[in-house]
Amino acid sequence: INAEYGDLIDIKELSKNMKISLDEEKQRRRELQEAVEEQRASWKEKVATLEEQLNTKNLEIANCKSVIADTEDTLAKLRTLSSSLQEEVLSKNETFEALKKQIEDLDQQRNTTVEKQKEQQILQLSEENQQQKELLDKKSEELRSLKKLFSLKEKEWRDRSAGVAEEQAH
């Protein structure tokens, strides 16, 4: 009986130790589970932050693309305008040369019997020539201004493109 009782006490002690070990294991698992949950929450926060940053960058990229498209549109319009102004300047130059030739022809005809009438025509042509020249000068100035504007827009576009590249690099 004592031997059985001793075995029973040993079994009871062993059971008690196992229960303590089991409780310690449960506590350790709870702590590990809590640590895993905290880590998971931290990762979810980091993922949310990264998604927010990604959305912000995507918006910035979309804005930059819009600015680039607007700038390209402006450049195309400026090129078209510049081209038409150059054609107009060439046309005015041809008109000027034709008027100049007419003046030279009229100078040669001055010695005819209708000299006074020819002189009046020369004066009129000279005035028209002066007006054409003034208009040509004005158009040339407009062309220079447009070229300056084009250069500024081109620089602004390059600066924005460089800024976008830097932001994307970061």
Image (spheres, rainbow, N blue to C red):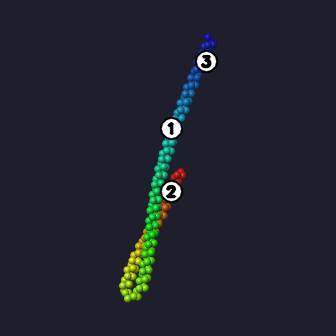
Determine the CA span between mark 1 and mark 3: 46 Å
Q: Residue at x 41, y 77 (%)?
A: 129
Q: Position of residue 51 (x, y in %)?
A: 49, 44
| Disc 1 secondary structure class | helix
Please say if 52 is above or below 90: above
Q: Point out the frontmost of discs 1 and 2.
A: 2
Q: Position of residue 3 (x, y in %)?
A: 63, 13
Category of crowding for the residue at label 2, using alpha-carbon neighbours closer than 10 angstroms: few (below 14), some (14–19), many (at least 20) = some
| Disc 2 secondary structure class | helix
Q: Earlier in the sequence, mark 2 or mark 3?
A: 3
* Residue that numbered label 3 is attached to: 10
Determine the CA span between mark 2 and mark 3: 82 Å
Determine which of the numbered discs, if any, sits on residue 146 in the image. none
* Residue that numbered label 1 is attached to: 41
Residue 3 seen anywhere in this rendered image of the structure? yes
Q: Residue at x 40, y 80 (%)?
A: 126
Please say if 24 is above or below 145: above
